[in-house]
Amino acid sequence: MNNQKVWFITGASKGIGLALTNYLLSQGYAVAATSRSVASLEKAITVSPQNLLPLEVDITKDNDVKSAIKKTVERFGKIDVVVNNAGYSLVGSMEEMTDAEFRQTMDVNLFAAVNVLRNAIPYLRNQQSGHIINISSNAGYVGFANATSYNAAKFGLIGISEALFEELKPFGIHVTMVAPGQFRTNFMNISSMQYVQNKIDVYGIEEAQKMWSNYSGQQIGDPEKLVRILAQVTAMDQPPKRLLLGPDTYELVTKQFQTTLEEFEQWKDITLSTNFD
């Protein structure tokens, strides 16, 4: 193995995770790639797997993640880049979601990333180097109706990343939170995007399911460009803390920040009125 960086990627058997894994392997990087099914992962790899460590991991289980991180270091001697990519969206209103549905989306989209971070950071800190890339979404900055659990997880990942940036700066560890827009992956496929089971007609989830299914495969974002950007970011001396990817995300998020500032100003008098006289 050469001296290229060692990457640890979750959710590597499809979507952005798979595109990133294939690209990195084609460039000679070492990749530890996790999936719920190693067979599916290995079948999806389209380049030489010489520097690939495929790992069957339930990322919602801390011991599974701890073991995967340990195996990565045993195989490659280090970890340089950690990418929290695994996730899925549950479409439905808060009223329609069961407790189990909401908690499962949080387990996969947020707490799994926490498991990875908790177990990877000691290695990065001991090295006094490394780069954490947390894949959030424009849904980590902007609220969308019928995406409450996904919003909660992605907003949470942004908050964790903000704090980690400050915590890990003294150890030479970079943190980049990435917010992609709509990229042409299988994220919206009927087999990937999930919908609440207990639908209430007034929320229109049946129509939303048809719309998203029809839109799948029509997204304007090129995932190959996205993964090349991620590789480029890890080569920077001063990588971005926050990275928006896609014109749709740029428009949505910048408009959200502008609207937020306008609202803060609108209620400024009340905001500033709370100190003792």
Image (cartoon, helix red, strand yellow):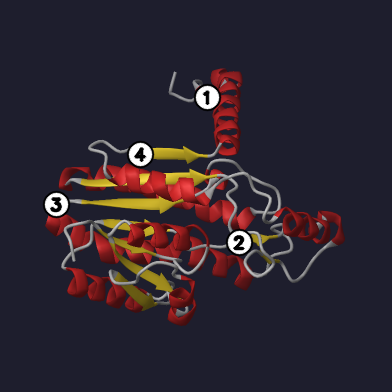
Disc 4 target residue: 241
Residue contact at pointers 1 and 3, CB within 8 angstroms: no
Question: In the picture shown, does residue 186 fall above or below 160?
Answer: below
Of badges 4 and 1, nearer the viewer stands 4
Residue pictured at 17% horizontal, 61% vertical: 2
Residue 264 percent across, percent down from the top left: 56, 24
Badge 2 amino acid: Asn
Where is the N terminus found, in terms of image quarters?
A: bottom left
Residue contact at pointers 4 and 1, CB within 8 angstroms: no
Residue 172 quadrant: top left
Residue contact at pointers 4 and 3, CB within 8 angstroms: no
Bin the neighbour count of mark 1 within 10 Å (Cα to Cα): few under 14, some 14-19, many 20 and up. Answer: few
Residue pictured at 74% horizontal, 63% vertical: 96
Counting residues from the start of the chain, the first of labels 4 and 2 encountered is 2
Q: Which mark is residue 128?
A: 3
Residue pictured at 57% horizontal, 35% vertical: 247
Disc 2 target residue: 186
Badge 3 amino acid: Gln
Cα separation, mark 4 vs mark 2, equals 27 Å
Counting residues from the start of the chain, the first of labels 1 and 2 encountered is 2
Residue 218 percent across, percent down from the top left: 68, 50
Where is the C terminus found, in terms of image quarters?
A: top left
Residue 229 quadrant: top left
Residue pictured at 60% horizontal, 65% vertical: 102
Residue 164 percent across, percent down from the top left: 31, 48
Q: Which mark is residue 271?
A: 1
Badge 1 amino acid: Thr
Counting residues from the start of the chain, the first of labels 4 and 1 encountered is 4
Cα separation, mark 3 vs mark 2, equals 36 Å
